[in-house]
Amino acid sequence: VMGGISRRRGIVNNSTSESEFCTIEADIPLGEMFGYSTELRSMTQGKGEYSMEYNRHEIAPNHVIAKLVDAWAAKRAASPAAAAA
């Protein structure tokens, strides 16, 4: 589970274990959370659960910004309004 958090650019803040349960508190960018529910269930044989709450805004890393700009430019180039201009 910790590896899955790291792969999603997450930072683990705290983890606790009580009997057979483990709680992990981490900060993970919202854009990286899509599909996490399925991944967590796969890693935990369907027993894992998670919840999210807003924490703060942060500037995205340069490689993420570049990917977003490229996707926006491609979408804009493909739109009919851009072709008419």
Image (cartoon, rainbow, N blue to C red):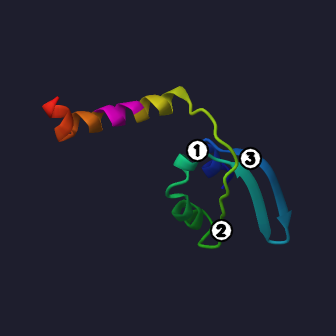
The answer to whether residue 71 is magenta is yes
Amino acid found under the numbered disc labelled 3: Val
Graded by Cα atoms within 10 Å as few (under 14), some (14 to 19) or many (20 or more), the crowding at tag 2 reads few
Q: Secondary structure at mark 3?
A: strand
Question: Which is nearer the N-term, disc 3 or disc 2?
Answer: 3
- Left or right: 13, with 49 as reference point: right
Graded by Cα atoms within 10 Å as few (under 14), some (14 to 19) or many (20 or more), the crowding at tag 3 reads some
Which residue has dot 3 on it?
Answer: 12
Q: Secondary structure at mark 2?
A: loop
Residue 5, how many percent across, how many down? Answer: 64, 49
Task: Write down the quadrant of residue 50 in the picture.
Answer: bottom right
Distance from the alpha carbon under mark 3 to that under mark 2 = 16 Å
Residue 28, how many percent across, how many down? Answer: 64, 47
Task: Look at 81% across and 55% down and name the residue there.
Answer: 15
Q: Are the two marked residues, 3 and 1, in contact with CB atoms closer than 8 angstroms?
A: no
Which residue has dot 1 on it?
Answer: 7
Amino acid found under the numbered disc labelled 1: Arg
| Foreground of the two, 7 or 84 | 84
Q: Which residues are magenta?
A: 69-73
Residue 2, how many percent across, how many down? Answer: 68, 51
Distance from the alpha carbon under mark 1 to that under mark 2 = 18 Å
- Left or right: 43, with 78 as reference point: right
Which residue has dot 2 on it?
Answer: 49
- Left or right: 1, with 13 as reference point: left
